Image (cartoon, rainbow, N blue to C red):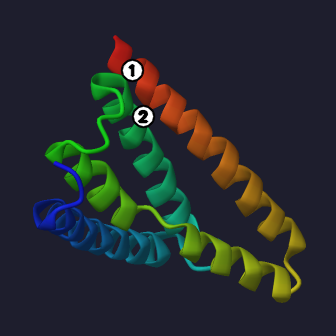
Amino acid sequence: MGHGITSVLLVALGGALGGIGRFAISNAMARLMGSAFPWGTLLVNASGAFIAGVLLGMYGAPTSQPAWLFAVAGLLGGYTTVSSFSLQTLELWQSGQALRAATNMATTLLLGVAMAALGWQWAQG
C-alpha cells in the first residue's frame, strides 16, 4: 500500500479520533483526580502502550497494512503523547516539584514498557 493518499487518510483519520480520545480522557482524569500530577496523560500513555502491545502480539508489525496504519500509526499515535508528557514533566520540575517530575518520568517509562509487554503477552494467549 505504501504511502499513497489512502495511507495518509487512514493515519489522519485515526490520529484525529485518537486525539479526541486523549483530550476526553485527560480532561476527565483532571476533573476526577486534580491537576497536581498528570494522571490523565499517564493513563492515556499506559493504555495506549497496552493496546499497541496487544496489536503487535496479534498481528506482528505489518506497518503498511491499512488496519495497522489506522490503528497504530493513526489512532494510537494521536491518542498517546510524548509532547504532553514532556511539557507536564518540565512544568513540575520548573515549579520546584522535582520528586513529582522524576516520578512521572520513571512511572511513564516503566509502566509504558510493562503495559506493552503485558498487552503482547495477553495477545499471545
Above/below status of 54 relative to 25: above
> Disc 1 and disc 2: Cα gap in Å?
9 Å
Q: Earlier in the sequence, mark 1 or mark 2?
A: 2
Image coordinates of residue 41 in percent, x first then y, are: 52, 66
Above/below status of 26 relative to 96: above
Counting the numbered discs, the total is 2
User: Which class describes the residues within 10 Å of circle 2: few (<14), some (14-19), or many (20+)?
Assistant: many
Q: Tell me if I can see residue 11 in this picture.
A: yes
| Residue located at (53% from left, 70% from top) | 33
Image coordinates of residue 46 in percent, x first then y, are: 50, 49
> Mark 1 belongs to which amino acid?
Trp
The residue most toward the bottom is 95
Image coordinates of residue 50 in percent, x first then y, are: 43, 39
Whether residue 69 sits left or right of residue 104 in the image: it is left
The disc label shown at residue 98, or none: none
The disc label shown at residue 122, or none: 1
Q: Secondary structure at mark 2?
A: helix
Image coordinates of residue 17 in percent, x first then y, are: 21, 68
| Residue located at (47% from left, 45% from top) | 49
Q: Secondary structure at mark 1?
A: helix
Q: Nearer the viewer, mark 1 or mark 2?
A: 2
| Residue located at (74% from left, 60% from top) | 105
Above/below status of 38 relative to 43: below
> Mark 2 belongs to which amino acid?
Gly
The residue indicated by pointer 2 is 53
User: Which class describes the residues within 10 Å of circle 1: few (<14), some (14-19), or many (20+)?
Assistant: some
Q: Are marks 1 and 2 in contact (CB under 8 Å)?
A: yes
Whether residue 118 sits left or right of residue 3 in the image: it is right
> The C terminus is located in which quarter?
top left
Q: Tell me if I can see residue 36 in this picture.
A: no
